[in-house]
Image: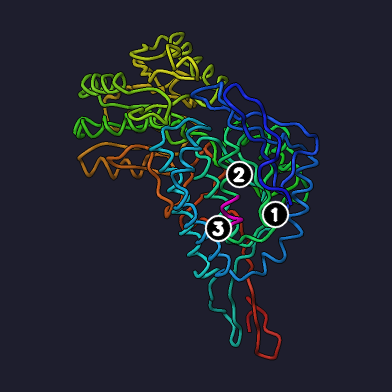
Amino acid sequence: MLGPVGVALVDGAVGLAEHFLNLIGEEWAPARSGETFEDRNPARWSELVGAFPQSGPEDVDAAVKTARAAYRGWRATPPPRRGEILLRAGLFLEQRKEELARTMTREMGKVVEEARGDVQEAIDMAFFAAGLGRRPFGEAIPSELPDKFCFTWREPVGVVGVITPWNFPVAVPSWKLFPALMAGNAIVFKPAEDSPLCGQRLVEVLLEAGLPPGVLNLVQGTGEQAGAAMVAHPDVNCISFTGSTEVGRQIATQCGRSLKRVGLELGGKNAIVVMDDADLELAVDGAVWAAFGTTGQRCTAASRMIVQRGVAADFVDALKQRAEGLRVGDGLQEGVQVGPIVNERQLRRVHGYTAVAREERATVLTGGEVLAEGPLGEGWFYSPTIFTDVRPEMRVAREEIFGPSTSVLVADSLEQALEYANSTVYGLSLSIYTNDVRRAFTAMRELEAGIVYVNAPTIGAEIQLPFGGVKQTGNGHREAGSTAMDEFTEWKSIYVDYSGRLQRAQIDT
């Protein structure tokens, strides 16, 4: 058995980087093709974090066969025993929180304080999922007939393909892996190619916690090769994907052809509504955190601010001042508040939306620039950006930018503000700041989103509540909370008739 790191070293511009491997069963192995891809630090592109297997269909097929062989034994493992493994994994994550957080910052750029929060979310999910092992997996239900017992239980779906994004490279996999494992499934896991090391470290923790060989298999690579092969594989029973709406639509189409179960958590165009009776300082605090935290690279980021006209000028002035005071840089440096964009392609995309805003006659109030002076020139940095004079029909008000850019729309009333908030194809997270209880409850009812906040920003979900959205934000599944295992289980209804005679349900006697 090889170790998780191959003996080969890749000569990078900054020192030597390790050559990492796939995990299939008990064996750490390179891609069948021998090809690799590079993982680099977005704050300092010359720094090579590592080289990872560029996996293809053959690697995926081997992983699926291994998972299928391990599935029966894992399915037969009592749920409390499964929970004990997840509990140990959570404890190991606690011990390695700082190490994992710093790895995350090197790999995808978010400031280390936020990276610690990412790992903490996985710790919380491990403990939460572990507790599910001693919770009811079904329920007893009265029969309409005498001497007949009825009950339900959950069964695992089989082999689950898990494909996760780079922006929450420990938290999001934990939302999927831990409940899927608790349900008794075997897994093939493909992390995002921009954060493969975080995915590997999470797998290593689960192995050390006692997960049997083959139950969790790691296949690194791109979505076009490894991800597509996993989606198409006939022995993968379920795909759980978090990423863009465009890719999610392709996955849904592919899975629909074979009626394969699929859970999709996709894009968002979230908004904060600020009414004229709001605590303005609190609203600005929330807006800064939601718009520019994680460099705006969150599915729940607030890329729209819908502000009632009476306070719009004061709100915009305060938001501009705060945005211009944010320190941009390497997320491992003390005092940095906004890290880099994850890669050059995404930087170009974000900057492209500034051009779109200008074409649509919006005002670039502040920011809108690629930052390339001094040390920032070594990475992919963008200035915190605010667009004003934005109308709901503009692209910058409708399309997901996924960067540190936010648009301000001015509304004349609560009704108009809610109309603007609901005017996109997405429905993940919406927020309202108001001190009027009537306005708050009206917004809770009318906002078209899976998550609604009152007097809090659009980010900050907790794992004990369901997470997910409506409209084109997904396909209706929810992660975490009371629904954590729904995506990864099938319900079975059981009828036990001990009357000793034929009893016909729904037939008059």
The disc labelled 3 sits on which kind of residue?
A: Met
Mark 3 or 1 closer to N-term? 1
Q: Judge the density around disc 2: few (<14), some (14-19), many (≥20) Cα neighbours within 10 Å.
A: many
Mark 1 or 2 closer to N-term? 1
Mark 2 or 3 closer to N-term? 2
- Determine which residue is flagged by label 2: 200
The disc labelled 1 sits on which kind of residue?
A: Val
Secondary structure at badge 2 equals helix
Specify start and end residues of the magenta stretch as a single range.
Answer: 204-208
In the displayed structure, 242 sits above or below 338; it is: below
What is the spatial separation of the Cα atoms under label 3 and label 1, in whole angstroms?
14 Å
Q: Residue furthest bottom?
A: 500
Mark seen at residue 270: none
The disc labelled 2 sits on which kind of residue?
A: Gln
- Determine which residue is flagged by label 3: 485
Asked if residue 399 shows in the view, the reply is no
Front of the two marks 3 and 1: 1
